[in-house]
């Protein structure tokens, strides 16, 4: 039995038409119907016919990504798809789950800690809260390529004389996203370029996610989480904030709230799985962002992208 890490896409992975292939599978179609009913909106139409501009709205992007991710997992689980290189669903032992940012909610559904319906309710509220926080405390984000963690931290400390700025995503070696107030992020970009950064890429986002500027969203999400029942994961779940396993439902809730104002430790999440003997990863969700990051974190890892395996016709 192959030990597998199931990983789930985060915001930024969305693209127009990302649901088109999924609705051709029974499990995919049923997942969209459930999401439509829970959210009281046509998430299927959004994922199949929505424009890039419509999908960029944080309040709808997050439930859309979670819906596509769970649809892909259910298609995989139903054995409608046979993965030639690794075999069918019964050949796998999903030994751990993790997701990038909003992808944590998909991971928690698969781990058994959270129902799909409750995950949808939470991410819809989460997206709304993050968008509102972005208006209350305006900010931006910047991806920096080619510098190590220590250098980025030092740059942020120096640039913080102009405002809030901190690392937001430790994606993989040499790729870190920073987040904060515009002037401070711009200063950090100048310092990064002087320090020899290969590239600095401004992100098209509605706020300074995973920074203290998201405090209003953290507080609001913590209140929303109190209303939702979580279970102990039946499949181990690795949290973004700590890069380690979490089992206690109350601790999971708190980490989901803290995630909005703290850095995403994605590299640590992947290395935790690798160190525990997982060398095969399957990415669920739109796009191939996580597949690329995992390969850069662990070159010997086998990485499979579920979306890329299914056809447009069933």
Image (cartoon, rainbow, N blue to C red):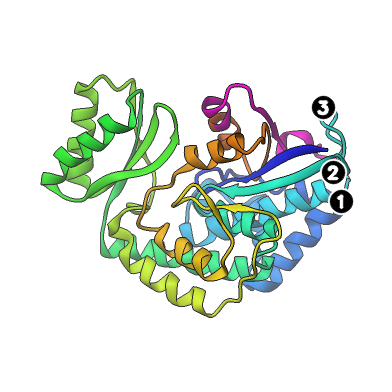
Give percent across and percent down for residue 147: 32, 25
Work out which quarter of the rendered image holds the N terminus and state it: top right
Q: Nearer the viewer, residue 244 or 40?
A: 244
Q: Is residue 84 left or right of residue 139?
A: right
Which dot marks residue 89? 2
Q: Nearer the viewer, residue 14 or 16?
A: 14
How dense is the environment of label 2, judged by Cα within 10 Å: few (below 14), some, or many (20 and up)?
A: some
**For the residues bearing labels 1 and 3, Cβ distance under 8 angstroms:** no
Query: Which residues are drawn in magenta?
Result: 294-314
Judged from the image, the secondary structure of the residue bearing numbered disc 2 is helix
In this rendering, the label closer to the viewer, 2 or 1:
2
Question: Which residue lies at the image location 11% right of the left edge and 45% below the top edge?
Answer: 161
How dense is the environment of label 1, judged by Cα within 10 Å: few (below 14), some, or many (20 and up)?
A: some
Question: Which residue lies at the image location 63% right of the left edge and 22% below the top edge?
Answer: 300
Give percent across and percent down for residue 190: 19, 29
Which dot marks residue 78? 1
Residue under label 3, please give it.
85
Q: Nearer the viewer, residue 246 or 17?
A: 246
């Amino acid at each position: 039995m192959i030990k597998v890490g199931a990983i789930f896409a985060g915001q930024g992975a969305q693209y127009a038409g990302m649901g088109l292939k999924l609705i051709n599978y029974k499990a995919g179609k049923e997942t969209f119907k459930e999401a439509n009913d829970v959210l009281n909106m046509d998430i299927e139409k959004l994922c199949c016919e929505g424009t890039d501009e419509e999908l960029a709205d944080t309040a709808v992007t997050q439930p859309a990504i979670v819906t596509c991710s769970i649809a892909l997992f259910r298609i995989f689980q139903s054995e409608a798809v046979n993965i030639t290189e690794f075999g069918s669903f019964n050949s796998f032992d999903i030994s751990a789950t993790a997701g990038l940012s909003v992808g944590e909610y998909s991971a928690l559904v698969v781990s058994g800690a959270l129902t799909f319906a409750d995950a949808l309710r939470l991410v819809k509220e989460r997206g709304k809260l993050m968008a509102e926080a972005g208006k209350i405390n305006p900010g931006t984000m910047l991806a920096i390529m080619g510098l190590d963690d220590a250098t980025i931290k030092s740059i942020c400390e120096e640039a913080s004389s102009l405002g809030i700025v901190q690392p937001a995503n430790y994606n993989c070696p040499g790729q870190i996203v920073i987040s904060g107030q515009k002037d401070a992020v711009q200063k950090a970009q100048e310092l990064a370029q002087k320090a020899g950064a290969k590239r600095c890429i401004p992100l098209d986002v509605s706020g300074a996610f995973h920074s203290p500027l998201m405090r209003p969203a953290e507080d609001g999400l913590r209140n929303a989480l109190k209303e939702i029942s979580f279970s102990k994961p039946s499949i181990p779940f690795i949290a973004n904030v700590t890069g380690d396993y979490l089992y206690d439902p109350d601790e999971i809730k708190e980490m989901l709230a803290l995630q909005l104002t703290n850095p995403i430790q994605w590299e640590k999440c992947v290395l935790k799985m690798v160190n525990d003997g997982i060398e095969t990863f399957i990415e669920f969700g739109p796009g191939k962002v996580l597949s690329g990051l995992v390969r850069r974190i662990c070159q010997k890892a086998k990485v499979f992208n579920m979306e890329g395996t299914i056809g447009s016709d069933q």
